[in-house]
Image: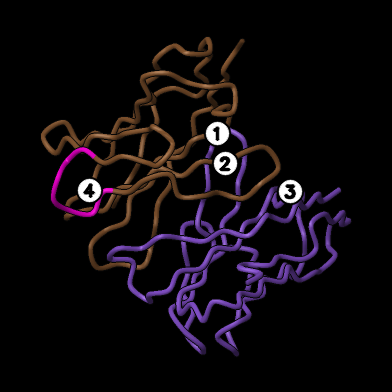
Amino acid sequence: AQSVTQLDSQVPVFEEAPVELRCNYSSSVSVYLFWYVQYPNQGLQLLLKYLSGSTLVESINGFEAEFNKSQTSFHLRKPSVHISDTAEYFCAVSDGGGFKTIFGAGTRLFVKA
Amino acid sequence: NAGVTQTPKFQVLKTGQSMTLQCAQDMNHEYMSWYRQDPGMGLRLIHYSVGAGITDQGEVPNGYNVSRSTTEDFPLRLLSAAPSQTSVYFCASSRDRSLRANVLTFGAGSRLTVL
């Protein structure tokens, strides 16, 4: 069975500082990996995804994540955060032939001025 | 395009009451699903459907029923609400019935409180 572990429930950080949100997964088959973001009182939106190919994937707003198969990780990073990045971030995994996307417990990112 | 529309946004029930959370999408998506979101637990899959007339159970299906009579609609029914079902519920859909390269489109959520 697949599972996703997000190692930090809350991450406070000052504006313009770098941030890393950690995600580890377990699966016995090939996987597809996702990061979704949830702004207050909204549904989730896709931030970025890894399907195949280059292990480093980027989003349009400066986030990036690197798929590391040997460490079964898909950590999310941003070199300089903004107040507007304050949100909850969810790591998710979907197996190659199934119908289920499994989510981690989420990490709340607080960006302080 | 409205995307994924959920109603109601808020609902308060008493224990034992029944209700239906509605979900509709106008993107002709084959795949639809229901999640519940609880603090510290992320999103957990309740039920999903890969097309009209086809449904299956997710991680936490007990206490919930679904049906998929049309491509557009995927209602979630609580037959006898319990306080443990207090949660925020999200409907999500995807173009493809398989999640091989799946990106889920989420509704805005329905907050349910069971007293």
Magenta span of residues: A50-56
- Chain for mark 2? A
Q: Which residue is mark 4?
A: A27
Q: Nearer the viewer, residue A1 or A78?
A: A78
In magenta segment, residue A53: yes
Residue B71 occupies quadrant: bottom right
Q: Nearer the viewer, residue B71 or A86?
A: A86
Upstream in sequence: badge 4 or badge 2: 4
Q: Main secondary structure of the magenta part?
A: loop
Percent position of residue B70, x then y: 59, 89
* Vertical position of residue B3 compared to residue A95: above or below: below
Q: Which residue is mark 1?
A: A88
Q: Are marks 3 and 2 in contact (CB under 8 Å)?
A: no
In the shown orientation, is residue B90 left or right of residue A80?
Answer: right
Percent position of residue B115, x then y: 86, 48
* Rendering colour (chain B): purple
Chain depicted in brown: A
Q: Are marks 1 and 3 on the same chain?
A: no
Measured in 3D between alpha carbons, the distance from the residue under mark 4 to the one under mark 2, in whole angstroms, is 25 Å
Name the amino acid, label 1. Glu
Upstream in sequence: badge 1 or badge 2: 2
Measured in 3D between alpha carbons, the distance from the residue under mark 3 to the one under mark 4, in whole angstroms, is 30 Å
Residue B64 occupies quadrant: bottom right
Q: Are marks 4 and 2 in contact (CB under 8 Å)?
A: no
Q: Are marks 1 and 2 in contact (CB under 8 Å)?
A: yes
Q: Are marks 4 and 1 on the same chain?
A: yes
Measured in 3D between alpha carbons, the distance from the residue under mark 4 to the one under mark 1, in whole angstroms, is 24 Å
Element at label 4: loop
Q: Which residue is mark 2?
A: A38
- Chain for mark 4? A
